[in-house]
Amino acid sequence: DYSEAVQPISVKAATVVYKFECTDCFIVPGCASEGKLLVSKECATVINNNQASLKYKVHVDNVGEGTLSLVEFEDIITIPSQLSTGNIIVSPSSLNVDTSVTGRVKIFGSIGTIEPGGRVVITYNIPITAISSPGGYSISNIARAAAESTESSDLCETPLNVIKLKAD
C-alpha cells in the first residue's frame, strides 16, 4: 500500500557520501502519505420566541495527503446546573448523545473515513427548556477528532445572559 518513489543513488567512499540525483533511478516503495485532521467550530446562542438554543457547527477536515479511516469525534459541553436542556438534535444522527452526568452533554462516535481534502460537517442544537435563576452563564466546550496518528481540537465559550421580568 506504499506509493512509488524515486530513490537517488548514494555511494560512500571512506567517510564521504556521494549522492547522485537522477531521473529513472531506482523505483522503491515510498512512505505512505498521511492524513491530518483539522477541527474548527462555530457556536452561538439563538433566542427565538423567548426560547434559548445553543447551536454548534463543527468542521472536521482532512488537510493531509492520505485517507483517514475510523475517525472518532467527541464534544463535551459543560452546562451550568441552573439550565435544563431539552431534546438534543444531532447531525449526522449516527453520533451518540450522553446526558447521564448532570451539567454535561457529551456528543461522540465514529464519523467514518475522510479522504484527503474531505470534510465532515457536524451540527447540533441544544434547546434550553428551563432556567432556575437569572444571571450570566457561560457554556464551554471542546470538540475533538482523532484518527490513526493525528488529532485536532477546537473550543468555544457561549455566553447566555438571563433576566427575570416581573409584572406590577
Image: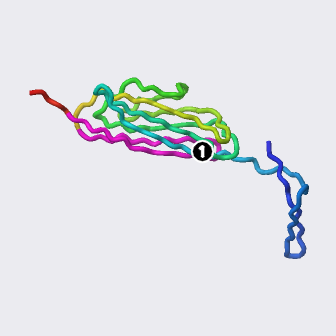
Of residues 45 and 13, the one drawn nearer to the viewer in this rendering: 45
Residue 115 falls in image quadrant: top right
Identified at 56% across, 39% down, the residue is: 60
Name the image quarter holding residue 98: top left
Q: Quadrant of the N terminus?
A: top right
Tell which of 141 and 117 is nearer to you. 117
Q: Quadrant of the C terminus?
A: top left
* Residue at horizontal 77 percent and vertical 50 percent from the top: 31
Number of dots carrying numbers: 1
Mark 1 packing: few (<14 Cα in 10 Å), some, or many (20+)? many
Question: Label 1: which residue?
Answer: 37
**Secondary structure character of the magenta stretch overall:** strand
**Residue 51 among those drawn in magenta:** no
Q: Which residues are magenta?
A: 135-163
Q: Residue at x 54, y 37 (%)?
A: 73
Q: Secondary structure at mark 1?
A: strand
Residue at (26, 41) in percent of width and height:
136
